[in-house]
Image (cartoon, grey):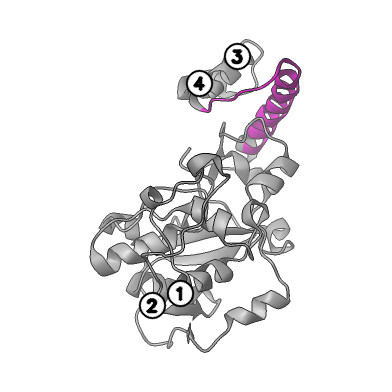
Amino acid sequence: MMDILDHEGSLFNKPNVISVPITMYNIYPRVYGTDEIYDRFEIFCKNLEIIDELNSKNNSVIYGITKFADWKDDELKTNNVSYIKFDKMDTRFMYSNWIHLKWDGKTKIPISWDWRDLRAVTHVKSQMAAVVESLYYLKYGRYISISESEMVDCDHMNEGCVGGNTKHALWRGSYKGFIQHHDYFPSPLGHRYYCPKYSTIFLDKLYFIHPDENSIAWFISYIGPVSLNLAMLQINKLYKGGIIMDSKECREIIPNHSAEAIGFGEENGTKYWILKNSWGHE
């Protein structure tokens, strides 16, 4: 695929414009009707132009073809970005069992950290389950796979596939618990789904980390990965690698996406966070 992407230094190339989507659909299978395929092709071509434009003027980050390359921005917003709910329900999560933590200003924070080096990061998924899996491994030395489908189907107070609240999902895990992927059967006996009565994995403690960079870096390096909310620009649906720089546009939107911070570092004087995204393994 990279041979096609790099051909003559441009994605949007007339000889390539047919072969590129064909290659994409081999990697990211789609089922479209006859009429829709033409609309998708048009969206795809526009995104190719955007990719070329971004890569021509940005040296720190690489954009390319992803599984969202034939999606419009509003589709990404509707189907994948978990918008954070700032409402009255949010106050329920600040119970006394949430432990508030802040860096003491003295403990040394390393220059870099990456939990992948210690094999404490599980496969990428499509929902907020990653941080629970990582912390379980750090405590018990065993990998688990939390059922994200059960979290979406059975948490009736957290908006399902149209968004949700990270704190609510974790709070629910402290009293309702989580179950592993192999224990959840979304469609038994022809029903849409079945929510199990009992779970097997529970959160013993809930931590609320003070939202400053030093406190987050300290927690990551001394305790474990962090589930956080961040401002995700729509253009990042085409992200392939590199460091996404802070921007005025990013600072002007409210946090709209959940991810797992698994490390941090510095490259050529630029500090960065290492995030495990929640848009699926593709």
Q: Secondary structure at mark 3?
A: loop
> Disc 4 vs disc 3: which is toward the camera?
4
Specify the segment rendered in magenta.
28-54
**Of discs 4 and 1, which sits in the foreground?**
1
Q: Which residue is mark 4?
A: 26
Spatial separation of the CA atoms under disc 1 and disc 3:
52 Å
**Badge 3 amino acid:** Asn
Say if residue 9 shows up in the picture.
yes
Q: Which mark is residue 204?
A: 2
Q: For numbered disc 4, what is the local secondary structure?
A: helix
Q: Is residue 171 above or below residue 188?
A: below
Instruction: State the residue at coordinates (50%, 46%).
Output: 186
Reading the chain from its start, which is encountered first: label 4 or label 3? 3
Percent of width and height locating residue 51? 64, 33
Question: Secondary structure under badge 2?
Answer: loop
The residue drawn where x is 52% and y is 58% is 151
Mark 1 or 3: in front is: 1
Based on the displayed image, in which of its 4 quarters is residue 201 positioned?
bottom left
| Comes first in the chain, label 2 or label 1 | 1
Is 55 or 17 nearer to us in this picture? 17
| Contact check, label 2 and label 1, Cβ < 8 Å | yes
Return the residue at label 3.
16
Q: Nearer the viewer, residue 266 or 74?
A: 74
Instruction: Look at the magenta stretch and give its main secondary structure.
Output: helix
Q: Earlier in the sequence, mark 2 or mark 4?
A: 4
Distance from the alpha carbon under mark 2 to that under mark 4: 44 Å
- Residue 252 picture location, percent across and down: 74, 63
Q: CA distance from mark 3 to mark 2?
A: 54 Å
- The numbered mark, 4 or 1, whose residue comes first in the sequence reads 4
